[in-house]
Image (cartoon, helix red, strand yellow):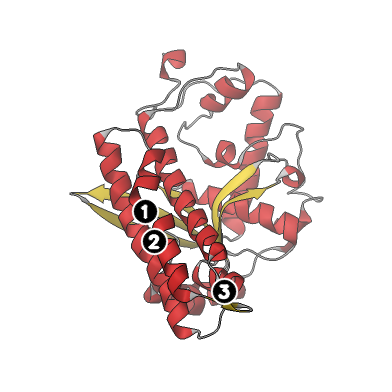
């Protein structure tokens, strides 16, 4: 999911990154300006990025029910399925890195490539990963397709680096072949957000925040990558200008993947901050926003509103 094709990499490096640098971002909207308006938090309540960006309920009444009234409802089918498939991708990436670090060396700082690939194949074996999803046929089928795709991509990346680098150690191999952190844990308190955030991935080779979606496109999805970019800037004080949402569909027994690359500019940043403040006020002042113009299909809070 996180590996770009050569064409996509050229798009990012030769077009999007230069465009982002040329357009620039207002200094006041960089995450490292968290102590000053408009980024400094107005309200004491801490929200998750998904509570700001996950605007499936148009009025935000789901947030009111959950955070003010304490209503707890199980996730709907789409949410549960998406979480299971997210976990599969993250688990495979983690297992691959673990296998690389566990591979023996033929000399100091020089990994045994053959043993590494063999260990990688064992670590990514199908039966180890399909247990993360329920024994339900449709979900098992999707997980199998996803596993097969990720398996080939990971092994190909590692093998490509091993064949081009005669002498390479485990740490360098992991960094070159798998240059991303999955389930990146972040403390968002400087921006009035939760101290326990988790971004799907941050890639270092093509510096951007990556989010995976197993469903249809929504305009507000870009607010999620924007929120994580702001948090990263607040913590590390380096610019994060790009986001990528990976949309994954299962059609007629195969995977279909589309990537929405976007510049995290002033408009997205300002919208995220405005929505953060509006939703934090809703929770802190216990404001019931009422029903949205249209409720979305599968809302877990349906029975509490109707």
Query: Can residue 272 be seen at all in this image of the molecule?
Result: yes
> On screen, 91 above or below 265?
above
Q: Secondary structure at mark 2?
A: helix
**Along the line of sight, the residue nearer the viewer: 264 or 201:** 201
Q: Are marks 1 and 2 in contact (CB under 8 Å)?
A: yes
Q: CA distance from mark 2 to mark 3?
A: 18 Å
Residue drawn at point x = 22 percent, y = 49 percent:
251
**233 lies left or right of 151:** right
Query: Marks 1 and 3, how far apart in space?
Result: 23 Å
What x and y, as percent, mark residue 5? 38, 71
Q: Position of residue 288 (x, y in %)?
A: 59, 20
Residue in view at x 53 percent, y 19 percent: 72
Number of the label disc, if any, that sits on residue 121? 2
Q: Earlier in the sequence, mark 1 or mark 3?
A: 3
Is there CB contact under 8 Å for labels 2 and 3? no
Which residue is drawn at the image coordinates 46% and 84% (left, top)? 164
Sort mark 3 into few (<14), some (14-19) or many (20+) by Cα contacts within 10 Å: some
Residue 69: x %, y % from top left: 60, 16
Q: Callout 1: helix, strand or loop?
A: loop
- Residue 15 in the image: state x and y as whole percent: 48, 76
Quadrant location of the N terminus in the rendered image: bottom left
> Does 173 sit above or below residue 123?
below
Mark number, residue 105: 3
Q: Secondary structure at mark 3?
A: strand
Nearer to me, 263 or 88:
88
Bin the neighbour count of mark 2 within 10 Å (Cα to Cα): few under 14, some 14-19, many 20 and up. Answer: some
Q: Is residue 259 above or below residue 218?
A: below
The residue wearing badge 1 is 125
């Amino acid at each position: 999911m996180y590996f770009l094709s050569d064409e996509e990499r050229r798009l990012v490096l030769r077009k999007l990154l230069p465009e982002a640098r040329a357009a620039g971002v207002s200094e006041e909207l960089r995450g490292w300006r968290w102590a000053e308006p408009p980024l400094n938090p107005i309200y004491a309540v801490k929200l998750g990025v998904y509570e700001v960006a996950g605007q499936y309920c148009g009025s935000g009444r789901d947030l009111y029910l959950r955070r003010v009234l304490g209503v707890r409802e199980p996730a709907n089918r789409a949410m549960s399925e998406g979480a299971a498939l997210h976990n599969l991708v993250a688990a495979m990436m983690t297992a691959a890195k673990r296998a690389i670090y566990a591979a023996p060396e033929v000399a100091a700082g020089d990994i045994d490539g053959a043993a590494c690939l063999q260990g990688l194949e064992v670590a990514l074996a199908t039966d180890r990963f399909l247990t993360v999803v329920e024994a339900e046929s449709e979900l098992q089928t999707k997980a199998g397709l996803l596993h097969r795709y990720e398996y080939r991509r990971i092994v190909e990346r590692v093998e490509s680096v091993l064949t081009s680098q005669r002498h390479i150690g485990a740490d360098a191999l992991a960094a070159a072949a798998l240059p991303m952190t999955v389930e990146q844990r972040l403390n968002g308190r400087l921006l009035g957000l939760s101290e326990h955030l988790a971004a799907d991935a941050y890639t270092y080779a093509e510096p951007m925040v990556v989010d995976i979606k197993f469903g249809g496109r929504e305009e507000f999805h870009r607010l999620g990558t924007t929120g994580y970019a702001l948090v990263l800037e607040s913590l590390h004080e380096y610019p994060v200008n790009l986001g990528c949402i990976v949309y994954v569909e299962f059609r007629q027994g195969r995977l279909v993947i589309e990537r929405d690359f976007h510049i995290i500019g002033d408009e997205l940043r300002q919208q995220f901050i405005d929505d953060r403040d509006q939703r934090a006020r809703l929770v802190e002042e216990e404001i019931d926003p009422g029903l949205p113009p249209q409720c979305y299909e599968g809302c877990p809070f349906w029975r509490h509103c109707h």
